[in-house]
Image (cartoon, grey):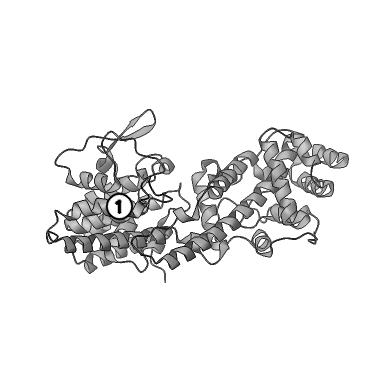
Amino acid sequence: MAMSTINRFIFLFDTAFQALPVKVSMVETERLAKLVHYAMESKTRAYHTSEHVFGLCEGMQPLQVLAALFHDLVYYQLDGGFPAHTANLLEDVIRSEEGALTLQTIHPEDAVLALCADLFGFEPGQVLPLYGGLNEFLSAVVAARLLQAHLSAADLMAVVACIESTIPFRKPDGQGRTAADRLAQRVQVHTRGLPGNREPDAAQAMVHRVVRDAITLANRDVDSFSAQDPGLFLSSTWLLIEESNAPLAVAGQYTLQEYRHGLSRMDAFLRNLDPGDIFQYYQGYPSPREVDGLCTAADRNIAFACDFLGAKIASLAIIEALALCTGTDGPVSMFLGDIRSADGRPERIEDFLPPVTPTAHFNPDLLRVFEKGRTQESTNDLTTSPITAFVYRYTGHAGTAYTLAQARKMFDGVLTPQAFVHSLDRGMVRAIARACSHIALSRRAALLELARNL
């Protein structure tokens, strides 16, 4: 039988403390677990959830586990501020100025906050980058302030360093130093004053140990990029799309254009992501061969996800154009049908699309994902992509790419919605318009008229 989520958090905290070993009462362990549990179970989250944390903790050492438990605690822009029960730990850390969050002056006696700022390379008065360490830094501050009574200075430093390493997708600086190199330099400064590290060899050994542990955790945090099954990476990507696009949180309400904007943002991000910026390494760890393998797998998965997202955007653009040709933008469910219904299986557009036998070249793995679905379930979208599968079967890989290129012209205002649909295969658009007419009651007459005139 499965242990409840909150009790899994309690178990992970307790096991980590016992393994260090440090004596922490079960009352205190429960308090820490409840705080993390509350944040990770927020309804605004789809990817950065308890399950993500549990996967990250598996097989890790105690200090890595403690870092993993806290590393996503704060997600300021997603949660709309600090998680519950942490305001007292963070209200003196940052101030909001015209929408920007600035690190406040650090009190000389606040050694824990100074440690976090130093290891993250942040200075008082600095605007903290929203997507470059803000959330990880605030999560580290909460972790350090809650754990300082239980951990040694060296162990506390290691936990903060591990959380810092989970800031993703960082390029080398102007001197060619990687994020891990920069973290190692900051860790080295702090090791010099720790007991037992007065000898250079001992201090250097600690730096290597801390940074290697941090890299191991950081690479585990992004390991979906190196998944052997592109469908697994695609599932993680989809959860991130849902999580980072607030309008998509309510199934049945988000519009065609809101849906398209969410897909397009992720598509643009992935197309501009360098696989070499995903995984971290430091002084031969992981080995160059391992890093090359990880980057190769990431490159393959990103390409697959971009093909998937491009095809989704292309097929959705056809529905968007039909909506604009017959009226205005509207909810996706108005044209494609509901995802689910309390009254039984809802009518959906695929119920009215004709069967298509592919004649043009296509990627069978991509078509399988469209038709069979992504690996993980979604609460706000179908895991299958019936309309995309129809377009992909009808036009093939190259034809879908052409449709996407034409769709981008429509998005940019170069083509009108009418010109866009007339630039595509008339039989395909006609079949989609007629299928939509069975779902979109208020547009039925206009859709049928459009289909007749194609």
- Mark 1 closeness class: few <14, some 14–19, many ≥20 residues within 10 Å: many
- Taking 376 as reference, is 311 above or below it? above
- Taking 212 as reference, is 317 above or below it? above
Q: Residue at x 38, y 27 (%)?
A: 98
Work out which residue is located at the far front of the displayed protein and give it: 175
Which residue carries the number 1 mark? 183
Q: Residue at x 18, y 63 (%)?
A: 201
Question: Quadrant of residue 230 in the image?
Answer: bottom right
Q: Nearer the viewer, residue 105 or 255?
A: 105
Say what amino acid the circle numbered 1 marks: Leu
Q: Nearer the viewer, residue 206 or 108?
A: 206
Quadrant including the N terminus:
bottom left
Quadrant including the C terminus:
top right
Work out which residue is located at the far right of the displayed protein and give it: 452
Q: Residue at x 19, y 61 (%)?
A: 25
In the picture, measured across the screen, residue 16 lies left or right of residue 231, that is: left
The answer, for residue 134, to whether it is visible in the render is yes
Question: Quadrant of residue 8 in the image?
Answer: bottom left
Which percent across, then down, holds residue 409? 69, 38
